[in-house]
Image (tube, grey):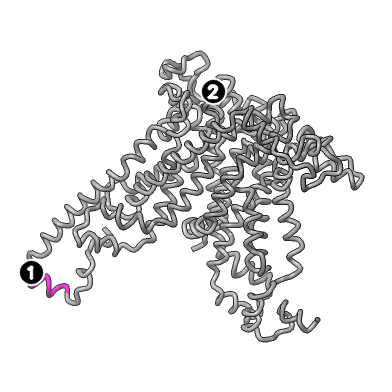
């Protein structure tokens, strides 16, 4: 027993090279698993509670002592949610807004990102500095005039008012420029020698190579838009424009707050799509942040 | 200009010889270069135009407009004719700092940043190091679990926390009750509301720091670590002498972005407490939002600019402290 556990932790082995190779296949520091599992439980506890509560009848949620696995599982919360709050249209609104905003950012940010990374033109440095400077501007500085602007364009009554201001964001330009800068110049020069037009170079050569960065930007933008709360709360004038977070927040601040089950079911509906998107594209996400964030 | 030579042209062994043989070769190439640059510039502006148009309308214009608003008295003016206002200089700013509520909100924001930011960075870094060096199995499970709160909607999460922190029926106080502890009213208690929100922010954001730090840790060359180990450096020494300096860029990035986010602390108090109880969770952004809601667009804009100045100051400070020393 003890002779086996030593090479596993690596303490008994004097050959360091061998030790490194061996520990990689084993557990590392076994004593770390306990605290890490404790922290992991803290991190996911609210999600477990939410999932569990969403499928419980109201009385069971307040049951003492609390039970994690519902004893009388029910879909009543979800049925009532979609019936009373018009969650279906909110869900559709969230999808439309998030997809439009994501598409806009992918297109416009990669276009400018390429120009800033690889093309020579007067004003390049100026444009870059200007766009980057606005990265630090807090949302609230632009918020008030933006609201006046959108109101003056008569867009407060439509989903367009939720989409337009977020179609092109400085962060996207930063991310795309960083990534495209790392692509070799020779590729572009060779295409030029072959007579490829400048725009064709972008479309046929750069864009396909930029897929990992586009995936990262796409996920970040989608999540950001899906979770965006303040702007749709203020701009949406009637229930037909509400997005999911707005609907959920209004439901939770109303008199109905005592209805835990509905709120927890609503939270599940808000969180499920982004969780799935994240789990599916996790690898892209992490790789993208790794390559773009550290330069 | 850098790399204006085409491939194949820069590699000529004897440049002077080729120029000597064809004295005119320089000119057509130069003019080709020029028209190529003209083409590049045209393409660049074509590619930039859609972004810049949106950027101008929905970013630059509002930024300038907001600055003007903060210097005017819009109380009485009609919003649809924003030019019909009177300039009042820095009156709004003076009024802001005379308003005890705003000063109180600034103090809350400062506490949020000064306590929350280091906690978030430390927790994220610790998690990254533990996952990278400490354990070998189930890394993906821990990584996804730690990162899960980052991708969630703050509204959904605030709703869940609100039910968990309910004084009488919430799970937190129920569990505390098993140990004979009479839990406080958390969000309804002026002593606990802000600390609870700081902890929630740490809980929610440590995953971001962790992911970026993990990427940074993976870029630390294994050979460097082995060399340090052979030189007799202990684990602690290896971390501070080898790993940590290489993590600086990652630390700077996360410190700046998290700092900017924390200075604009808004969603949690909005959903959970509305800034209460007794303004104990009122943030500067929350204050500005309330002013906006009351129609005081000028004061709200001024508050926005105060936050902007704080963000710039914090970012500059972080660059000073954390920038690479080379």
Residue A238's disc is 2
> Dot 2 falls on which chain?
A
Residue B91, visible in the rendered structure = no
Q: Quadrant of residue B294?
A: top right
Characterize the local packing of mark 2: few (<14), some (14-19) or many (20 or more) Cα atoms within 10 angstroms. Answer: few
Q: CA distance from mark 1 to mark 2?
A: 74 Å
The one of A2 and A139 positioned closer to us in this rendering = A2
> Dot 1 falls on which chain?
B
Residue shown at the point (11%, 70%) measured from the top left:
B19
Q: Residue A33's x, y, as percent?
A: 74, 65
Q: Is residue B239 above or below residue B38?
A: below
Q: Is residue B276 above or below residue B128?
A: above
Check if residue B170 falls in the magenta segment. no
- Position of A174 compared to A22: left or right? left
- Position of B70 compared to B18: left or right? right
Q: Residue B56's x, y, as percent?
A: 37, 35
Query: Which residues make up the magenta segment?
Result: B15-22
Q: Residue A178's x, y, as percent?
A: 42, 55
């Amino acid at each position: 027993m003890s002779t086996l556990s030593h090479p596993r932790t690596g303490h008994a082995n004097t050959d360091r090279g061998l030790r490194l190779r061996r520990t990689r296949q084993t557990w590392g520091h076994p004593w770390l698993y306990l605290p890490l599992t404790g922290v992991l439980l803290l991190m996911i506890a609210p999600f477990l509670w939410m999932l569990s509560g969403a499928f419980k009848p109201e009385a069971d949620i307040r049951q003492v002592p609390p039970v994690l696995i519902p004893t009388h599982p029910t879909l009543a919360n979800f049925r009532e949610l979609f019936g009373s709050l018009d969650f279906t249209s909110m869900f559709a609104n969230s999808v439309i807004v998030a997809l439009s905003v994501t598409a806009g950012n992918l297109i416009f940010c990669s276009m400018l990102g390429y120009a800033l990374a690889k093309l020579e033109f007067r004003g390049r440095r100026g444009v870059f500095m200007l766009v980057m400077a606005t990265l630090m501007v807090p949302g609230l500085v632009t918020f008030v005039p933006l609201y006046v602007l959108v109101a003056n364009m008569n867009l407060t009554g439509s989903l367009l008012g939720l989409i337009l201001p977020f179609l092109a964001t400085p962060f996207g330009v930063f991310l795309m420029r960083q990534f495209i800068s790392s692509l070799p110049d020779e590729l572009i020069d060779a295409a030029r020698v072959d007579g490829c037009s400048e725009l064709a170079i972008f479309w046929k050569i750069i864009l396909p190579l930029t897929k990992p960065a586009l995936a990262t930007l796409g996920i970040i933008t989608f999540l950001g838009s899906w979770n965006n709360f303040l702007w749709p709360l203020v701009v949406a004038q009637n229930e037909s424009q509400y997005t999911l977070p707005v609907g959920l927040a209004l439901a939770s601040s109303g008199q109905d707050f005592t209805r835990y089950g509905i709120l927890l079911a609503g939270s599940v509906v808000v969180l499920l799509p982004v969780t799935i998107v994240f789990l599916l594209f996790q690898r892209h996400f992490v790789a993208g942040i790794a390559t773009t964030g550290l330069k | 200009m850098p790399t204006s030579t085409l491939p194949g042209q820069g590699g000529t062994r004897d440049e002077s010889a080729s120029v000597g043989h064809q004295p005119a070769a320089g000119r057509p190439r130069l003019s080709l270069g020029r028209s190529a640059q003209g083409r590049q510039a045209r393409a660049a502006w074509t590619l930039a135009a859609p972004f810049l148009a949106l950027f101008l309308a929905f970013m630059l214009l509002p930024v300038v407009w907001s600055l003007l608003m903060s210097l005017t008295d819009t109380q009485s003016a009609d919003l649809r004719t924003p030019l019909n206002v009177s300039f009042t200089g820095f009156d709004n700013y003076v009024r802001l700092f005379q308003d005890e509520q705003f000063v109180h909100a600034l103090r809350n924001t400062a506490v949020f940043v000064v306590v929350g930011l280091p906690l978030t960075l430390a927790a994220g870094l610790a998690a990254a190091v533990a996952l990278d060096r400490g354990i070998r199995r189930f890394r993906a499970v821990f990584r996804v679990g730690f990162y899960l709160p980052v991708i969630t909607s703050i509204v959904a999460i605030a709703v869940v926390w609100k039910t968990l922190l309910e004084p009488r029926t919430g799970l937190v106080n129920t569990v505390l009750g098993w140990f004979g502890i009479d839990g406080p009213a958390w969000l309804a208690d002026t002593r606990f509301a802000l600390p609870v929100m700081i902890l929630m922010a740490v809980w929610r954001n440590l995953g971001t720091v962790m992911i970026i730090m993990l990427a940074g840790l993976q870029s630390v060359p294994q050979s460097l670590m082995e060399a340090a180990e052979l030189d007799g450096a202990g684990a602690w020494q290896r971390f501070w002498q080898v790993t940590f300096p290489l993590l600086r860029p990652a630390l700077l990035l996360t410190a700046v972005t998290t700092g900017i986010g924390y200075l604009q602390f808004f969603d949690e108090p909005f959903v959970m407490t509305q800034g209460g109880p007794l303004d104990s969770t009122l943030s500067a952004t929350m204050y500005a939002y309330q002013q906006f809601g009351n129609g005081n667009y000028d004061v709200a804009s001024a508050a926005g600019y105060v936050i902007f100045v704080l963000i710039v100051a914090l970012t500059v400070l972080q660059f000073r402290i954390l920038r690479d020393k080379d």
